[in-house]
Image (spheres, rainbow, N blue to C red):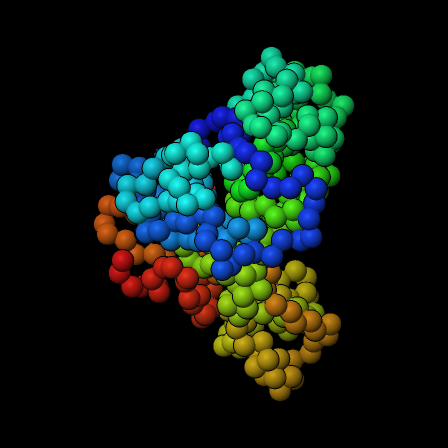
């Protein structure tokens, strides 16, 4: 579900114009974003359920979650567009509904309403005019590969071009923190690379980024820290490496006619939790890859081309959103996509960061 469509939010210069050395998150500094025990309901739906999150200045944090998880709701609370039913949200130490807090904020909502009859440069001038020291329009448009479109009405832009402009507008006021809700949805590979570079440059100059994405490779490429949200609950909150490590599942790839028979691997080897077969190529997932390989060798089954590697973020994510969260009857968040990924039999439970273990009552 989307936030209300609107242009980027006003922001204020809080960062130097020139790129500085890559930012080191100031973990000892007061959090620039602080969400404490926040619950937000929409009628019977609990979009966020007792969520707590602290983001230090200079962090680049990716929020992952399936459709309806509560990601956009979280951003709308941080940006002050909505208020929590309970709990508190602080942006730069202030209530984000206080305009003073939002002067240091740049925002790209999931759906952006650009005035169709205004030209691209006019929109940038207009938004930039709210700030004391905006990025010069030509410079900003060049950075986002939009220089040649400066004189075009926004109604004549492609979807991808509009998306690039929407992210550019979040940066025009030199904000100290930006919220990007699915910034590259609908973009082709080149346009996505341009935006990724702009986000990296902004972060390298000391900016704080909180972004949601459906593209796991985007979060993997950009974020230092990943927050996994599912059904309104934070299921994991850690560095990318720790998230991958936490899941502990490894992928074993090999070629074997004997194991390519449906059910053969799972039946024979208890360590195997999931199997994908394509011809004689077999991909197996196991929390105990070493044990599986030892037993495979001992079994005498013919195989070749063995590879073992860690799980991708996508696999880690599937594991995390697979564990159900128990809520009081009638208040469970509804995911439009229905049940999330099926948790593989025997897969290790992921210890959530701020959520109950599987089966615990909230
Ligand atoms: N204005 C609203 N009215 C009613 N229900 C809402 C509203 N906004 C959000 N919800 C519900 O709250 C839950 C969380 O929605 P939210 O948009 O935050 O999820 P999301 O993770 O951003 O999803 P997506 O990835 O699909 O954008 C969903 O069940 C959604 O249907």
Q: Residue furthest front?
A: 132
Residue 310 in the image: above or below residue 81: below
Tell me the residue at 57%/51% (across/down).
58
- Residue 35, horizontal then vertical, whole percent: 39, 49
Q: Is residue 87 visible?
A: yes
Determine the quadrant in which ligand 1 lies: top left
Tell me the residue at 65%/72% (across/down).
308
**Residue 171 vs residue 151, the one in the foreground:** 171
Q: Residue furthest right?
A: 148
**Residue 205 vs residue 122, the one in the foreground:** 205
- Residue 95, horizontal then vertical, whole percent: 37, 40
- Residue 60, horizontal then vertical, whole percent: 57, 51
Q: Residue furthest left?
A: 329
- Residue 53, horizontal then vertical, whole percent: 42, 53
Q: Is residue 257 visible?
A: no
Q: Residue furthest bottom?
A: 298
**Residue 339 vs residue 357, the one in the foreground:** 357
**Residue 277 vs residue 40, the one in the foreground:** 40
* Quarter of the rendering occupied by the N terminus: top left
User: Quadrant of the rendered structure where residue 192 is?
Assistant: top right
Residue 21 in the image: above or below residue 195: below
Tell me the residue at 76%/23% (across/down).
148
């Amino acid at each position: 579900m989307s936030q209300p469509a609107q242009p980027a939010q006003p922001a204020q210069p809080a960062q130097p114009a020139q790129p500085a050395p890559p930012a080191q998150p100031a973990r000892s500094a007061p959090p620039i974003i602080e969400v404490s025990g926040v619950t937000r309901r929409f009628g019977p739906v609990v979009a966020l359920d007792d969520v707590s999150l602290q983001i230090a200045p200079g962090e680049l944090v990716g929020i992952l979650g399936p459709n309806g998880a509560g990601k956009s709701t979280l951003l709308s609370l941080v940006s002050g567009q909505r208020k929590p039913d309970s709990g508190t949200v602080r942006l730069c130490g202030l209530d984000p509904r206080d305009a003073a807090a939002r002067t240091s904020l740049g925002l790209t909502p999931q759906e952006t309403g650009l005035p169709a009859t205004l030209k691209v440069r006019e929109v940038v001038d207009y938004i930039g005019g709210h700030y004391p020291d905006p990025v010069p329009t030509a410079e900003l448009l060049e950075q986002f590969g939009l220089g040649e479109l400066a004189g075009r009405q926004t109604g004549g832009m492609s979807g991808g071009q509009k998306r690039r402009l929407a992210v550019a507008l979040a940066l025009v006021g030199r904000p100290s923190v930006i919220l990007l809700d699915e910034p590259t949805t609908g973009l082709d590979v080149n346009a996505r690379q341009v935006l990724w570079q702009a986000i990296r440059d902004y972060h390298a100059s000391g900016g704080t980024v909180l972004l949601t994405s459906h593209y796991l490779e985007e979060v993997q490429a950009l974020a230092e820290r990943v927050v996994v949200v599912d059904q309104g609950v934070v299921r994991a909150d850690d560095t990318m490496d720790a998230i991958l490590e936490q899941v502990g599942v490894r992928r074993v790839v090999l070629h074997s006619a004997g194991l390519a028979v449906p059910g053969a691997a799972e039946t024979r080897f208890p360590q195997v939790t999931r199997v994908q077969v394509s011809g004689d190529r077999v991909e197996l997932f196991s929390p105990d890859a070493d044990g599986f390989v030892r037993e495979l060798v001992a079994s005498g089954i013919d195989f070749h081309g063995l590879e073992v590697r860690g799980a991708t973020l996508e696999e880690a994510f599937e594991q995390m959103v697979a564990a159900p969260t128990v809520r009081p009857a009638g208040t469970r968040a509804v995911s439009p996509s229905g049940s999330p990924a099926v948790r593989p039999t025997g897969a290790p439970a992921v210890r959530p960061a701020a959520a109950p273990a599987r089966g615990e009552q909230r």
